[in-house]
Image (spheres, rainbow, N blue to C red):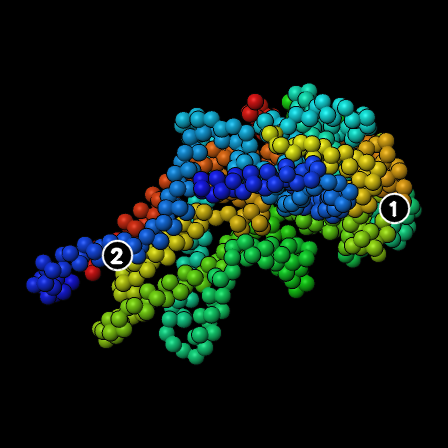
Amino acid sequence: MKTMIAGLAFAASIIGSLAIVGPAAAAETANIWVRADGSNFMPRIVDAFNKGHENQIKLDIIPNAEIIPKYGAAAAGGTAPDALSLDLIYTPSFAAAGQLEDITDWAKSLPYFASLSPAHVKTGTYKDRIYGLPFSADSSVLIWNKKLFKQAGLDPEKGPTNWAEIEAAAEKVNALGGDIKGFYFSGNCGGCNIFTFTPLIWASGGDILTEDGSKATLDSPQLRGAIDLYRSMVKKDLVPAGAQTDTGSNFFAAFAAGNIGISPSGAFAIGALNTQYPDIDYGVTFLPGKDGGWSSFAGGDNFVVTKGTTKVAVVKEFLDFAYSLEGQTILAKYGSLPVRGDIANEALKDLDPRYKVAAEAMAKGRTPYSVVFNDLINSANGPWNQMVNEVFFGEDVDGAISNAQETMQSIIDSAPQQ
Amino acid sequence: MTSIATITTPARPRKLVGAGRRQWIGLLYVAPAVALVVVFFIIPLCMTAWMSLHNWPLMGVHRFIGLDNYWAILRDTRFWNALRFTGYYTVIVTIAIFAVAFPLALFIERPRPLTGFYRTSFFMPAVIGFASASLLWSWLLNVDAGLFSPAAFELGLTEKKVNLLATFQPAFWSIIAMVVWKVAGFTMIILMTGLQSIPPDLQEAAMIDGAGPFARFRAITLPLMRRTLALALILSVAGSVLAFDQFYIILRGGPRNQTLTAVYWIFNQSFVSFKLGYGAALSMVLLVILVALSLIQLRLLRQPEGVD
């Protein structure tokens, strides 16, 4: 092993000296990782960047579930990429682990810093320093099937604007019978429900965590109300039986099959439906509160830089390009929302108008902040997922809520303080 | 053995040198195997033990904390619950596998028409990986798009489509059925070789003495299969204690975390909570438990004194 490293170092020094002898400045190549969710737009941005720049980016696409452990292993072995596009909710825990480069000064020097997606910047900030900046964005919205609405005698151009309207419309669509169901959600998927269920609570004035993520606040009338909405729809058989055990694999597919009236979903669904299911005629609206109003989960990726990398300059150059109008337009065209508020409309102007709703949802979207997000929310065996499954389908709603409240608080309290 | 020893005695002085050399050559022959075991088992095992003494996050710095991880395990009720469930699952699934595999072995042991066909078809599921088998069954068990629930509904057996994975009992027994389908063929082959090694004249003699089929099975077949049974049992128990894939892929530990196995918990601690050190400590505890279980089984199924 040692001789191999020595050999590599020798080879590198030769290449290095050749480069110095060679003409002009040496082009550098930075390595970047992205999770599979970004496999549509990321290669296109990287290609566009590589064509117009001396410095190059080498992109690796990693399966969604693998990227965190793989990055951890690579960081331990000293082979981590120079930067990665990271699910934004992980930014606090990565920053807390001391794994990320502090990019506060550079970020604040950007002229458009103030118009970058606020939800991203908030999760990218740890102890008042900035470790992550927005890269791609996905907001949660409500989608409805216009064809089924028309068949059920509803106005196909008008989506539900409060909870009572959701339930009433779902009931009407459900009455069409056969394989057609009124409503769909993934009932055994923590990630899906934080994305699409909590906005119902937020829009009604409640929350599940305090602003700084230090307290769980599950015991609220707003959460109870939202639970009652889902329970009532399950009880009336408006939801397919498979929802109870859907771990997220049907999150998008159920609506795309064309038999579902209404489903909470995300901006990603617009691109996916348009390209893969062009026959589905659907509308996009906000996830409403109990009596109107709306909210959204601002998701997507933060761009983070591995601590100690020597390619910071290349990485910044790349991010600068991604933030340009050209970069933002590529992003919007291939499945992500723009992350720069000031040029979002311009980047979206030639695209499906339904993106505008999603972009507006993004601008006012929220993201829970926690260094133990994975443990609390995303884990299939975490307290959040266990609770949603029990309260939507089980008997003991109060017990499930208080149990989850207690477990979440104990996970927060025993989180590593660094 | 003794007869060979007496024959070789006269040649001893000359052979001693050769024996020494042959020992070296022998070592050379086993060296690749030893190297594999060292690189892929001993070293990782030592590393796991070393990591278990640290607070070792997936990212960031690790620090030595002595036995703190092990003290934490003592208070980790969810791990002990997972272990209890693993024990329950192991007992049930082992009984189920043997209850299916033994009759199958008896059935295919003797040549009869189509034996080859039966052997192959019973054994077939064993060559599929656990992960792919789980994916197949998670489709079969799906309430909307699968096979079992819609079929039962269409045939009028159930009033509406029953979601088999939504509550503990049907979910648990579905997994048992899947594992038996997948593993019984393999156990059957092991048991069959044991059956075939019993000399037929013993059975014939007993038959002439008037022993019925049940008496022959109890007094001849079972005792002579001790070693085979021990092998099949240890393989089945070890495999079940380490169960993970099927619960992860089909059930995600649900419904409501009632099917979290010990390995699943280790996986969660290591790769969901990013506590690699703690996961390593849990693995060491599970290793000790597994070694103890295997020793107990070997002892119970040891040949009694005086029987060769």
Residue at far left of view: B10
Q: Residue at x 14, y 56 (%)?
A: B16
- Marks 2/1 same chain: no
Residue A313, by quadrant, is top right
| Residue B212: x %, y % from top left | 29, 70
Taking the image as drawn, is residue B275 in sight?
yes
Query: Is residue A2 depicted above or below B8 in this figure?
Result: above
Taking the image as drawn, is residue A168 in sight?
no
Return the residue at label 1: A352
| Residue A194: x %, y % from top left | 70, 36
The quadrant in which the N terminus of chain B is found is bottom left
The number of discs equals 2
Disc 2 from disc 1: Cα separation: 75 Å
Residue A59, by quadrant, is top right
**At numbered mark 1, what does the secondary structure look like: helix, strand or loop?**
loop
Q: Chain of mark 2?
A: B
Which numbered disc covers residue A287? none
Which numbered disc covers residue B25? 2
Mark 2 surroundings within 10 Å by alpha-carbon count, few (fewer than 14), some (14 through 19), many (20 or more): few
Q: Residue at x 70, y 37 (%)?
A: A24
- Horizontal side of residue B77 vs A360, given as left or right: left
The quadrant in which the C terminus of chain B is found is bottom left
Mark 2: which amino acid?
A: Ile
Q: Residue at x 10, y 66 (%)?
A: B7
Tell me whether the residue at label 2 lies in contact with that at label 1, contact meaning CB atoms closer than 8 angstroms: no
| Residue B108: x %, y % from top left | 41, 71
Q: Nearer the viewer, mark 2 or mark 1?
A: 2
Q: Chain of mark 1?
A: A
Mark 1: which amino acid?
A: Asp
Residue A382, by quadrant, is top right
**At numbered mark 2, what does the secondary structure look like: helix, strand or loop?**
helix
